[in-house]
Amino acid sequence: MTHCVLILGGSFDPVHNGHIALGAHFCKLLEPDELRVIPAGNPWQKERLLATADHREEMLRRAFEAQQLPIKIDRQEIERKGATYTIDTVRAIRDEIGPQASIVLLLGIDQLNRLDSWHEWRNIFNYVHICAASRPGYPADWSQMPHEVAAEFSRRKGTLGQIRSTSHGLTYLTQDLAVDVSATDIRLALQHGAKPASLIPPVVLDYIEQFHLYKD
C-alpha cells in the first residue's frame, strides 16, 4: 500500500479538542502511516503567539499520544527564519518523503474558506492532497466559499481510496465532524481562572496549570 502521511498544522496555542478530532477523524478514514503535526513558528496571518514553541510542542505530544495516534511532531516551521508559509512546508515534506507517497494536508472549513489568501495556494496541490472538515458554525456552503477556491476544490474532488493510493492533487470534504472549539475562547477562559476541561484534553490542561500558561 502507498505510504501515507497526514499533515496537521496550526498555532496550537493551545492544542484543543478540535485539533485532536480533525486528526483522529482522518486517521480513521485514511489509516495513515504517520500523522505529522506541525506547530507554527511565525505565521504571517496570525497575531503573536502566547506560549513558547517548546511548550506548544510538549502540549501537542501529550495530547496526540493520549489518543494513540501515529504522531510525529515536525519543528520545521518553528526553526524556519522569517514568515512561515504552507507552500514551503509541503514542498519540504515532499522532498523528504519522495514522489510516490500520499501526503494529505488537513484543514478545517474555516481555513478552507481563506485558502485563496494563502501564499501560492494553487501550487500546494502540486505537492499534497487537501482534505477538509466542516464544523458547527462553519458549514460546507459552496456559495459562501471564495469562488476560485470552490471551483478548484470541486474540480479536484476525489474519493478516499484515490487519495490514499495517489500522491497529490485531489480534494475531499467531510461534513460530519461535530466539534466546535475556539483557541481564543480557551485562552480567555484560562486568563480568567476557569478550567475549560470540555474543550482541551486533560493532559494538556494539567500541563497548562503546571507551568501557569495563559495567565497574563
Image: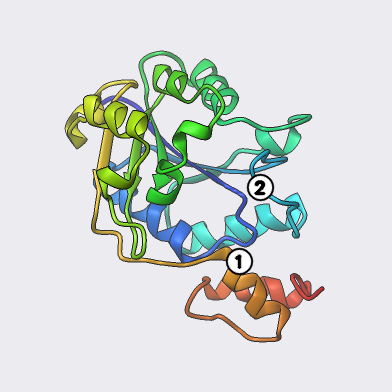
Q: Percent x, y for residue 190?
A: 67, 78
Q: Percent x, y for residue 207?
A: 68, 71
Secondary structure under tag 2 reads: loop
Nearest the viewer among 198 and 147 is 147
Give the Cα distance between marks 2 and 1: 12 Å
Secondary structure under tag 1 reads: helix
Amino acid type for the residue under numbered disc 1: Thr
At 35% from the left and 27% from the top, the residue drawn is: 3
Proximity of marks 2 and 1: CB atoms separated by less than 8 Å: no
Picture quadrant of residue 128: top left
Q: Which residue is mark 1?
A: 184
> Which badge, 2 or 1, comes first in the chain's sequence?
2
State the quadrant of the C terminus: bottom right
At 65% from the left and 43% from the top, the residue drawn is: 40
Horizontally, residue 212 falls left or right of residue 91, namely: right
Q: Percent x, y for residue 131?
A: 33, 39
At 26% from the left and 43% from the top, the residue drawn is: 142
Horizontally, residue 178 falls left or right of residue 120, namely: left
State the quadrant of the N terminus: top left
Can you tell which mark lies on residue 46?
Answer: 2
Amino acid type for the residue under numbered disc 2: Lys
Q: Percent x, y for residue 196?
A: 56, 80
Q: Which residue is at the far right?
A: 216
Nearest the viewer among 123 and 164 is 123
Nearest the viewer among 168 and 192 is 192
